[in-house]
Image: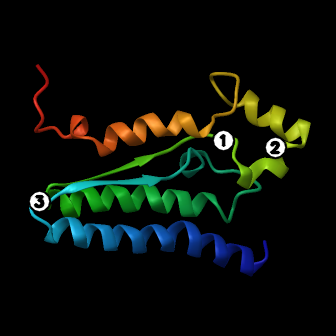
Amino acid sequence: MPLEVWERTRQVNLDGSFYITQAVARQMKEQTPQGGSIIGISSISALVGGAQQVHYTPTKAGILSLMQSTAVALGKYNIRANAILPGTIATDINKENLSDAKKREGMVKRTCLGRLGNPDDIAGPVVFLASDLANEEVKLK
Protein backbone atom coordinates (compact mmCIF):
# COMPACT_ATOMS: atom_id res chain seq x y z
CA MET A 1 0.00 0.00 0.00
CA PRO A 2 1.68 3.20 -1.11
CA LEU A 3 1.65 5.79 1.65
CA GLU A 4 0.18 8.32 -0.79
CA VAL A 5 -2.91 6.13 -1.33
CA TRP A 6 -3.42 5.76 2.43
CA GLU A 7 -3.05 9.49 3.01
CA ARG A 8 -5.31 10.55 0.14
CA THR A 9 -8.04 8.08 1.09
CA ARG A 10 -7.91 9.22 4.71
CA GLN A 11 -7.93 12.89 3.73
CA VAL A 12 -10.95 12.54 1.45
CA ASN A 13 -13.04 10.05 3.42
CA LEU A 14 -12.32 10.73 7.08
CA ASP A 15 -10.81 14.20 7.26
CA GLY A 16 -13.36 15.52 4.76
CA SER A 17 -16.21 14.00 6.77
CA PHE A 18 -14.87 15.57 9.96
CA TYR A 19 -14.48 19.03 8.45
CA ILE A 20 -17.93 19.11 6.87
CA THR A 21 -19.54 17.69 10.02
CA GLN A 22 -17.85 20.36 12.12
CA ALA A 23 -18.93 23.19 9.80
CA VAL A 24 -22.52 21.98 9.49
CA ALA A 25 -22.83 21.31 13.22
CA ARG A 26 -21.60 24.81 14.00
CA GLN A 27 -24.30 26.26 11.72
CA MET A 28 -27.02 23.99 13.15
CA LYS A 29 -26.07 24.97 16.71
CA GLU A 30 -26.11 28.71 15.96
CA GLN A 31 -29.31 28.84 13.90
CA THR A 32 -32.78 29.42 15.28
CA PRO A 33 -34.30 27.00 15.91
CA GLN A 34 -31.29 24.87 16.72
CA GLY A 35 -30.95 21.46 15.21
CA GLY A 36 -30.82 19.40 12.10
CA SER A 37 -29.62 16.09 10.76
CA ILE A 38 -26.09 15.07 9.80
CA ILE A 39 -25.74 11.89 7.77
CA GLY A 40 -22.39 10.23 7.19
CA ILE A 41 -21.98 7.75 4.36
CA SER A 42 -19.88 4.94 5.77
CA SER A 43 -19.75 1.42 4.31
CA ILE A 44 -20.42 -2.15 5.31
CA SER A 45 -16.65 -2.42 4.93
CA ALA A 46 -16.41 -0.57 8.25
CA LEU A 47 -17.65 -3.77 9.89
CA VAL A 48 -16.24 -6.55 7.72
CA GLY A 49 -12.98 -5.27 6.26
CA GLY A 50 -11.39 -6.44 3.05
CA ALA A 51 -7.98 -7.69 1.97
CA GLN A 52 -7.69 -5.10 -0.79
CA GLN A 53 -9.20 -2.31 1.32
CA VAL A 54 -6.70 -1.68 4.11
CA HIS A 55 -6.68 2.00 3.16
CA TYR A 56 -10.48 2.27 2.79
CA THR A 57 -12.10 0.30 5.61
CA PRO A 58 -10.49 2.21 8.49
CA THR A 59 -11.78 5.48 7.06
CA LYS A 60 -15.30 4.11 6.79
CA ALA A 61 -15.11 2.76 10.36
CA GLY A 62 -13.97 6.24 11.34
CA ILE A 63 -17.03 7.81 9.71
CA LEU A 64 -19.29 5.44 11.64
CA SER A 65 -17.54 6.36 14.88
CA LEU A 66 -17.61 10.06 13.98
CA MET A 67 -21.39 9.93 13.55
CA GLN A 68 -21.84 8.01 16.83
CA SER A 69 -19.79 10.55 18.76
CA THR A 70 -21.42 13.46 16.95
CA ALA A 71 -24.86 12.17 17.95
CA VAL A 72 -23.80 11.94 21.59
CA ALA A 73 -22.05 15.31 21.62
CA LEU A 74 -24.66 17.32 19.75
CA GLY A 75 -27.99 15.79 20.73
CA LYS A 76 -28.42 18.53 23.35
CA TYR A 77 -28.60 21.00 20.44
CA ASN A 78 -31.32 18.96 18.69
CA ILE A 79 -28.77 17.77 16.13
CA ARG A 80 -29.22 14.18 15.00
CA ALA A 81 -26.33 12.24 13.49
CA ASN A 82 -26.54 8.90 11.70
CA ALA A 83 -24.38 6.77 9.47
CA ILE A 84 -25.51 4.73 6.49
CA LEU A 85 -23.42 1.63 5.75
CA PRO A 86 -24.18 0.49 2.20
CA GLY A 87 -22.62 -2.45 0.46
CA THR A 88 -21.12 -2.10 -3.00
CA ILE A 89 -22.91 0.60 -4.94
CA ALA A 90 -22.35 0.69 -8.70
CA THR A 91 -21.03 4.18 -9.41
CA ASP A 92 -18.53 5.84 -11.71
CA ILE A 93 -15.86 5.64 -9.00
CA ASN A 94 -15.80 1.81 -9.10
CA LYS A 95 -16.82 1.38 -12.74
CA GLU A 96 -13.39 0.08 -13.78
CA ASN A 97 -13.25 -2.40 -10.91
CA LEU A 98 -16.76 -3.65 -11.66
CA SER A 99 -15.95 -4.14 -15.33
CA ASP A 100 -13.90 -7.19 -14.28
CA ALA A 101 -16.56 -9.94 -14.46
CA LYS A 102 -14.89 -12.10 -11.80
CA LYS A 103 -14.62 -9.22 -9.31
CA ARG A 104 -18.19 -8.14 -10.02
CA GLU A 105 -19.51 -11.67 -9.54
CA GLY A 106 -17.66 -11.94 -6.21
CA MET A 107 -19.17 -8.69 -5.01
CA VAL A 108 -22.67 -9.73 -6.08
CA LYS A 109 -22.33 -13.11 -4.31
CA ARG A 110 -21.72 -11.31 -1.01
CA THR A 111 -25.10 -9.59 -1.17
CA CYS A 112 -28.41 -10.85 0.16
CA LEU A 113 -30.34 -9.43 -2.80
CA GLY A 114 -28.05 -11.00 -5.39
CA ARG A 115 -27.26 -7.64 -6.99
CA LEU A 116 -25.10 -4.60 -6.50
CA GLY A 117 -26.68 -1.50 -5.09
CA ASN A 118 -27.35 1.67 -6.99
CA PRO A 119 -27.40 5.26 -5.73
CA ASP A 120 -31.20 5.22 -5.45
CA ASP A 121 -30.88 2.50 -2.79
CA ILE A 122 -29.19 5.04 -0.53
CA ALA A 123 -31.34 8.04 -1.45
CA GLY A 124 -34.45 6.83 0.41
CA PRO A 125 -32.74 6.28 3.77
CA VAL A 126 -30.91 9.61 3.43
CA VAL A 127 -34.14 11.48 2.71
CA PHE A 128 -35.86 9.77 5.66
CA LEU A 129 -33.02 10.49 8.11
CA ALA A 130 -32.88 14.11 6.98
CA SER A 131 -36.64 14.55 7.39
CA ASP A 132 -38.75 15.34 10.42
CA LEU A 133 -40.09 11.79 10.24
CA ALA A 134 -36.79 10.63 11.72
CA ASN A 135 -37.10 13.08 14.60
CA GLU A 136 -38.39 11.26 17.67
CA GLU A 137 -40.30 14.36 18.74
CA VAL A 138 -42.55 14.10 15.72
CA LYS A 139 -45.67 12.19 16.68
CA LEU A 140 -47.22 10.12 13.92
CA LYS A 141 -51.00 9.81 14.04
Task: Say left or right for 134 vs 54.
Answer: left
The quadrant where residue 100 appears: top right
Q: Residue furthest right?
A: 101
Task: Say left or right for 97 vs 66.
Answer: right
CB contact under 8 Å: marks 2 and 1: yes
Whole-percent x, y for residue 46 in the image = 55, 51
- Label 3 belongs to which residue? 76
Q: Secondary structure at mark 2?
A: helix
Q: Which tag, 3 or 2, sits closer to the chain's start?
A: 3
Q: Which tag, 2 or 1, sits closer to the chain's start?
A: 1
How far apart are the two marked residues, 3 and 2, measured between alpha carbons?
43 Å
Q: Which mark is residue 88?
A: 1
Q: Amino acid at mark 3?
A: Lys
Q: Secondary structure at mark 3?
A: helix
Whole-percent x, y for residue 70 in the image = 29, 62
Q: Which mark is residue 98?
A: 2
Q: Which tag, 1 or 3, sits closer to the chain's start?
A: 3
Between residue 3 and residue 76, name the one nearer to us. 76
